[in-house]
Amino acid sequence: MRKNLILASLLSIACVGCESSTNTASNTPPTNPAAASSDAKSSGKVSTFTLAWSEYPSWSVFGVADEIGLLNKEAGKQGELEKKWNVDVVLKGVDYDTCLQMYGSNTADAVCITNMDTLGPAMDRASVAILPTSTSVGADACIAVGIDDLDGLKGKATRGLERSVSQYAFERILVKKGLDPKDFPFTNMDPGAAASALQTGDSSVQSIMVWNPFVMQTLRDQPKSKKLFDSSEIPEEIIDMVVVGKDSLAKEGGKQFASCLVETFYAINARMSDPKTSDKTLVAIGANFSSLGLEDMKQVVQQTRFYQSPEDALKLLTSDEFRNKTMPAVVDFCVAQKIVKEKPSIGFDSADSQINFDTSFLKAQASGAK
Amino acid sequence: MIRRPIPRWLVVLLGILGVCTLLAVYGGLSYRQSAINPKQKVIPGLQAFRDGVSRMTEPQGTDESPKPSMLVTDLRATYWRLFLGMGLGVLLSVVVGIAMGSYRWIAAPLAPTISFLAKIPPTAMLPIYFVLVGSDQTMFTTMVALGIFFTMAQSVYQSITNDVRDEAIDKAYTLGASDPEIIYEVIWKQILPPILDNIRLQIGPAMIFLLAAEMLVGGEGIGYRIRMESRVLNMSIVYIYLGILGFTGLLGDWSLLWLRKKLCPWYDR
């Protein structure tokens, strides 16, 4: 009896060791996404891929896609577009930090992440950015109570999440205004906690740098609050995007997976721009983003500007500003803040870079849509 | 057979075996993760741990204004908050608990409120703490102190009503003892061991409250570091911090057990 018990526990340990999340590539994947589709159909094998997403306007799109049947978040079940591309997309809706951890630990094949936060995981897992989804144009803001302007803010602590887009935006905007970030101390506090501290009138918190929905909430619920500046001063610097691990992309069906995500995103965008379905889609996204209603969502999509078409996205990724100014500035910030030890290599359609902005899926989508 | 004694050497051997199994399972998992991604940091190997240790112990700041290393700063912040919070909480709960156990007119108004508040997890009350005590050092101390106060005051009160018998108090009165004398000679001496046990049991919860608060607010401390480093998957640092937490918990346990043996040798007989 006792021997059986020991045997059983040994077996259970062994099972943990042999469990594998996804199947491995057996042949070299095709290079052209369009060709890949027909290729996979002929082989008849369905590969499973995981996307980790958190609640954010342009990422909650994937939650909506599940609700209206374009994707099916569960393993073993396929939505409309999953069938078209012959992949099984598993959607994991979790906290943003958990998303980063899942991606970094290879538990997720793809992740919804900002351009800045990609640097850390990309040091250990070569990453391919396939789809910029939106950019912050006011969705990150510095809000204060009892401080009227930047002169008054000097020397006073601003609370926000350290080493995040909040701190990046804070310092970048100050520099752009010709000020020295050293004069403006930034101390760590969870954005949710910082917002509630400012709303409840905690005397030790006078200024916060947070993102939406906290920006909207705070400005609405704390009548004494004043917005000092926001990310509309640095448009197209904070980019929300979808990133796939290079290893996952190289697996059998990896390219179909990427194409499927790209098509899903634009399918929802099409519904947002069509006047007939626009409001309904916004409400559905709002239900997946802090339960915001239609009016709030209309404001949110102003402050979080979607890249509504592949052409929009390509315009960003091919712009000189983004390639030669924004990304190097982001890298410099991350090195200065010790988020990464050394600079990762960043490339555009160059497969060997640690972070590769790959436009092929967007181009395929653009030519397919026409 | 249940509770059949086993030889001492076997106890030691099996203990060592347990630790070795843990290490072997860890090694296996690390190996497996490295097979998926050779550069992984999630279940780091020895080299990554060495890097982590050197990052943690590297002195910060500049030559003109040197600052201690990350590890020293964090441990100092967290343990000072823990010590202050627990000290205050224990002191308060012992005073209130004894007062409640001694006088019915104190217990009657307090007992219902305290037993109700003892059931609410302090981590769920964080926003209330922000409003009441701000988000600085006071907040951490209050959080830990109040976090353990309600449960401890309740158990001190209960151990007086359950363990200190009426006969003992009556006898002391008959021998001419005053109220303060009875509280010290009869009640205090009898409930000291359960108080020490209670402090021991509260280290864990106090640590949870403190870390939860540190993960939300502040620029130093173990909770802060664990959140920041696990966000960028520097797990070598996170695991070392977790190990330190485990060891200090054990150390606290042992020292309180030792104190109990010293102060109340009669208790274990």
Image (tube, coloured by chain):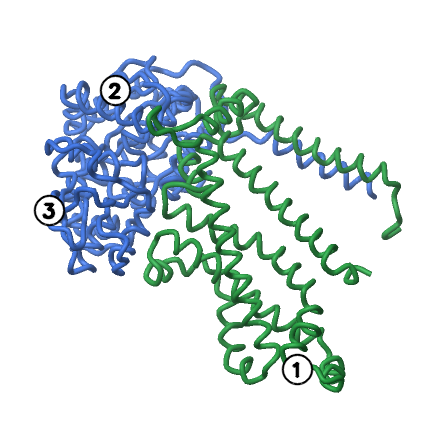
Chain colours: A blue, B green
In the foreground, A174 or A183:
A183
Residue A69 visible in the picture: no
Indicate the quadrant containing the C terminus of chain A: top left, top right, bottom left or bottom right: top left
Q: Vertically, is A186 above or below A351?
A: below
- Residue found at x 25% / y 60%: A201
- Locate residue B101: give its quadrant: bottom right
Circle number at residue B178:
1
Name the amino acid, label 1: Ser
Residue B74 left/right relative to B6: left
Q: Position of residue A25 (x, y in %)?
A: 47, 19
Other residues around mark 2 within 10 Å, as few (<14) / some (14–19) / many (≥20) = some
Circle number at residue A360:
2
Q: Position of residue B89 (x, y in %)?
A: 51, 61
Dots 2 and 3 on the same chain: yes
Other residues around mark 1 within 10 Å, as few (<14) / some (14–19) / many (≥20) = few
Indicate the quadrant containing the N terminus of chain A: top left, top right, bottom left or bottom right: top right
* Residue on which the image places disc 3: A149
Dots 2 and 1 on the same chain: no
Q: CA distance from mark 2 to mark 3?
A: 45 Å
Residue located farthest toward the bottom when viewing the structure as drawn: B174
Secondary structure at badge 2 equals helix
Residue B62 left/right relative to A235: right
Q: Position of residue A213 (x, y in %)?
A: 24, 50
Tag 2, which chain?
A: A
| Badge 2 or badge 3: first in the primary sequence | 3
